[in-house]
Amino acid sequence: MLLLMSPALLVVFVLLLIPLAWLFWQSFYGNGLTLEHYSRIWHDEIYWRTFALTFKISVIVTALTLLLGYPVAYVAAKLPRRSAIVVLMLVVLPFWTSVLVRTYAWLILLQRTGVVNSVLMSLGLTHSPITLANNQLGTVIAMVHILLPFMILPLYATMQKIPTDLMMAGSSLGGSPLHVFLRVFFPMSLSGVLAGTTLVFVLCLGFYITPELMGGGRTIMVSMVVARNVELYNQWGAASAVSVVLLLCVLAVFYIVSRIIPLDRILGK
């Protein structure tokens, strides 16, 4: 078995463990071993504000994807199999287009002369263009659209396993549809809710392309700080330290969630 696993283990070692070890080493290296990079993160207010903004946007995007994704997953779980397949195909259809293209599409739609502002002004809802792009609002809108399938799919996988007999039993005992949903269906779907929110939240923490384009330089997330430390300042140590802290945050999230549900439920296994 070890011999059969060796090719996969070699790929993991070369493409994951070695880069992580190099990243960890760089975070402690300057002109020799140093804690300067971590000290800068701890004392510099810019890093604190960047991490705070990253977590804030991640929470908002996760909450919005849950509010939008739960009804879609619920409807798909209640539909006949063929109709459910059509709904799921529409959910995963955006995956056929790259994140970069979808982000540019949102940039075109939300700009001051874009389709959204043109429609709002033609309907008389606004008298002048609204700033929907190059800010946090545009970043959140685009990230919600891109990450929504990652919320819907875990929810659907959990909901379709909930026996319909339990819902029928609740109704036969006099429960209204809302009461049966709140007391029977929703509690049984919480594992899917936790899996979806964890997956979306973790993906938000490391998102780069969408905040870079939709933020217009005003919405600085942690991934952008890492990129700028390397591209603009050639500070590999500082970038590595920020990356290590972000990685530790992700591992902490996974550890906390793993105390509630197994990680294989989050990873879709």
Image (cartoon, rainbow, N blue to C red):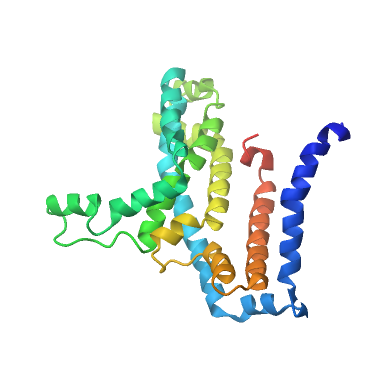
Q: Is residue 64 visible?
A: no
Q: Position of residue 237 (x, y in %)?
A: 68, 72
Q: Residue at x 18, y 49 (%)?
A: 119
Q: In the rendered image, which quarter is residue 3 located in?
A: top right
Residue, x 44% and y 40% (percent of image)?
97
Q: Is residue 237 left or right of residue 164?
A: right
Given residues 250 and 118, the one toward you in this image is 118
Relative side of 98 to 222, left or right = left
**Quick check: can you spot residue 131?**
yes
Q: Is residue 52 left or right of residue 243?
A: left
Q: Is residue 67 above or below residue 59?
A: above
Q: Quadrant of the N terminus?
A: top right
Residue found at x 53% / y 26%: 160
Please provide percent x and percent y for residue 255.
Answer: 69, 52
Quadrant of the image containing the C terminus? top right
- Which x, y percent locates residue 136? 39, 62
Which quadrant of the figure has residue 191? top right
Count of labels shown?
0
